[in-house]
Image (cartoon, rainbow, N blue to C red):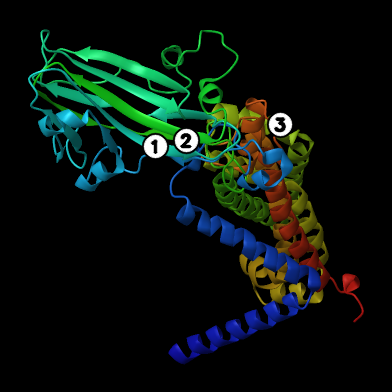
Amino acid sequence: MKASGETNLRFNLRRTYKFLKVLLSNRMAALGVIMLIIAIGAALVAPVLYPGNPQLVKVSGDFAQPGWVAYFPDGYYLSNNMVVVSDPSFANPSALQEWSYNYPQAQGAFLSFAWSPSTPVGPPSGSLQITSNASSSLGVTVSKVFHYPYHGPPSKFQLRAFQIDAQGASVNQPVQVSLFLTRGTEKTYTFWSTNVTNSNQWISPRYLLDSDADQFKLAGGLQPGEPLSLSAAIFSQVNDYTLGVSIHFSGPGRVNLTNLGLVADGTSFGLLGTDSQGSDLFAEVLHGARISLFVGLVSAFLGISLGLIVGLIAGYKTGLTDEALMRFTDMMLVLPALPLLLVLITVLGQNIFNIIILIGFLGWMGFARVIRSQVLSLKVRPFIEAARAAGAGTGRILKVHIFPNVVSLTYVNLALAVPAAILTEAALSFLGLGDPTLISWGQIISNAQAANALKDWWWIIPPGIGIAFVSLTFVLIGYALDEMFNPRLRRRR
């Protein structure tokens, strides 16, 4: 028995090798297989390069153009992401070296700067601790100079959730704190200023330190309804900027500060830019390959399997069985597939498995009629009559004698059914009826339409190319298989 199993395995491997050799000798099939390997590679590498759902991760400014556009004249005013401070939360003592400390030289003996583990959130964050032993007032500025190298402003910028704790502050001896940004030497923008009178209590601005926030705009000097954005008003030119916080002690005291930094979202990013939420479109396109391949293959397999079963039974079993199956097939054929899909998905729910089942259930009728016609021709042939005379039952005849003679049609139609399933899923996603928890190429185009961004070609064309690429892959393989199995279509070599 073991030797027999090894012989069968060796025979099947040899037959598979010969089949692949003949298949790849066909130019269309070879090209289709190469394209299929590329598509499968993209689907497999997507979760490795971009774990999780990339639509939930903001990587740059909204509607950012592809990064390589900056190398063309149209990209002169584009900007990239900027992170001004490498360790804004002072997680390590070395973070203190990133800042400059300005104070009256004569009062330097009364000041000390140190790293402290004191923080409002706990490790791994820390804080910069500034201690003043002067009995009179004393001012100190903590700042960092950075260069903005782009000719155009960022999409937006945010300051970190700056927090400060003034130990020893009171109504009689308040600590004055100001958070500012200076452009060159010409203008200073003070985004937050307050007198701290509560000791041993972490405080922060009561509004979001975001360039799109209304209160932050007012703090930056923009009036409501101003057409110019705060990003464009501040980062209007290539220049050196200074980010810092000024602290004025009224007497002896100690101040801890943390979360001091600035992040600017660029107007260009990556290979394909970003969507309306600032998510990486290239990552979304890669993730979309997984859904298209999964839906296409599983739906096509389900539809072809149903068509094969119905066609075999209807073709071999004449009379009432054949009549009932064919009339049901005719009824399914005249139903409009896409409107029916829209109704059923709305009722059953926008789940990927519901979509696969419905696409497969509505895609078997044509193949069932093809299989039935072949079975009608096969069942009257002498070898079927001989099998029946030898006592073979219906199941054995269908499995052993008829199915091997229609399996070539199964392979061909399976390959050709995949593009139809992919296009159907893309159409459903474009209409907003795809699975909202998964990324598909149709959903990407639907999101572009919802954001009124159909003019942004880097958002529209790549998923369209992906749909066409995968569909063409299976069309080439399907036509090549048809050419192999149908002698009348074989080319003279």
Q: Which residue is painted at 58% across and 17% down in the image?
A: 228
Front one among 478 and 367: 478
In this image, 296 relative to 217: left or right? right
Nearer-N-terminus badge (3/1) = 1
Q: Where is residue 162 in the image (x, y as percent from the top left)?
A: 29, 26
Q: SS for tag 2?
A: strand
Q: What residue type is labelled 1?
A: Val
**Neighbourhood count class around disc 3 (C-alpha, 10 Å): few under 14, some 14–19, many 20 upward:** some
Residue at image location 57% in from the left, 11% down from the top: 226
**Disc on res. 145:** 1
Q: Distance between the residues labelled 3 and 2?
A: 37 Å
- Mark 3: which amino acid? Leu
- Of residues 354 and 280, the one nearer the viewer is 280
Q: How far apart are marks 1 and 2 (CA)?
A: 7 Å
The quadrant of the rendering that contains the N terminus is: bottom left
Is 452 situated above or below 294?
A: above
Viewer-side residue, 42 vs 432 = 42
Instruction: Answer with left or right where residue 357 lies relative to residue 339.
Output: left
Of 481 and 136, nearer the camera is 136
Q: How many labels does the image show?
A: 3
Asked if labels 2 and 1 touch by Cβ distance under 8 angstroms, the answer is yes
Residue 128 visible to the viewer: yes
Q: Mark 2 points at which residue?
A: 240
Report the disc number at residue 454. Answer: 3
Which amino acid type corresponds to the residue marked 2 in the rendered image? Answer: Asp
Q: Is mark 3 on a helix, strand or loop?
A: loop
Q: In this view, does 204 lie above or below 118?
A: above
Q: In which quarter of the image is residue 86?
A: top left
Q: In which quarter of the image is the C terminus?
A: bottom right
Q: What element carries label 1?
A: strand
The numbered mark, 3 or 2, whose residue comes first in the sequence reads 2
Label 3, label 1: how far apart the Cα atoms are:
40 Å
